[in-house]
Amino acid sequence: MGNKLEGKIAVITGGNSGIGLATAKRFVTEGAYVFITGRRQKQLDLAVSEIGKNVIGIQSDVSNLADIDKLYNTVKDEKNHIDIIFANAGIAQFAPLEKISEEHFVKIFSINVKGLLFTVQTLLPIFQEGGSIILNASIGSSKGIEESSVYSATKAAVRSFARTWTVDLRHRKIRVNAISPGPIDTPIFSNLTQNEEQSEQFKKNIVNTVPMRRMGNPDEVAKVVSFLASDDSSYITGIELFVDGGLAQI
């Protein structure tokens, strides 16, 4: 594997599991130094030891602005600049329209939209000219998925940020792109169901709708994030890149 991210400093929110962890591992393998965040210290420590080198874990909840400030201060003290942000932290919870509560709405928007926006805004003062920002959206923003009103709306907001920030940050030559994963085999999927049997059935039902007839794995998404983070995508900004086995394309 080439060192296409050699010497780059990257911040990955929600880097302690799933897509975030797979991306952190790939970034380090490709020469970057990464800061990963996560809400749970124990899981964060495990992720840091799994990545093994060139990594610092920062306990941080993106919905808490004081935690985002802590992230900024740590990165500034350690490295003084950033080249790549992968705003990946997010949650998925579902409810039919008639059962959406204010708590459900506020929780998902606080993490997926507010947290993402203020993470990027807070880190901008130490973000390098010519850097790359990648936002984790979802096929949910363009598909009508049952019971996903609030979650899908947050991801549509993330997709919109990629467009507006492309324009807002063009004078600093910062590229902003969104990725939209389809069904990826991560812990978040198992958490959506009550037990393992339900989880397997849920996955089977989804796989039947995917043209490639399988779920994706986290490293397949990490490779796409790495492409958008590197100079390989130097003339790409403002896009939504689907990593979905064709699910939202047909």
Image: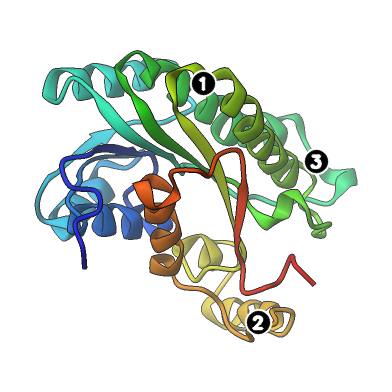
Residue 230 appears anywhere in the view = no
Which residue is under mark 2? Answer: 207
Q: Which dot, 3 or 2, sits closer to the camera?
A: 2
Disc 3 versus disc 2: distance between alpha carbons? 27 Å
Percent across and percent down for residue 28 are 19, 53
Percent across and percent down for residue 113 are 60, 31
Percent across and percent down for residue 17 are 36, 56
* Placement of the N terminus among the 4 image quadrants: bottom left
* Placement of the C terminus among the 4 image quadrants: bottom right
Q: Residue at x 60, y 47 (%)?
A: 137
Which residue is under mark 3? Answer: 100
| First-in-chain label (2 vs 1) | 1
Which residue is under mark 1? Answer: 169
The answer to whether residue 202 is above or below residue 232 is below
Q: Which dot, 3 or 1, sits closer to the camera?
A: 1
Disc 3 versus disc 1: distance between alpha carbons? 35 Å
Tag 1: Cα neighbours inside 10 Å, few (<14), some, or many (≥20)?
Answer: some
| First-in-chain label (3 vs 2) | 3
Tag 2: Cα neighbours inside 10 Å, few (<14), some, or many (≥20)?
Answer: some
What type is the residue that disc 1 sits on? Leu
Disc number for residue 4: none
Dot 2: element: helix
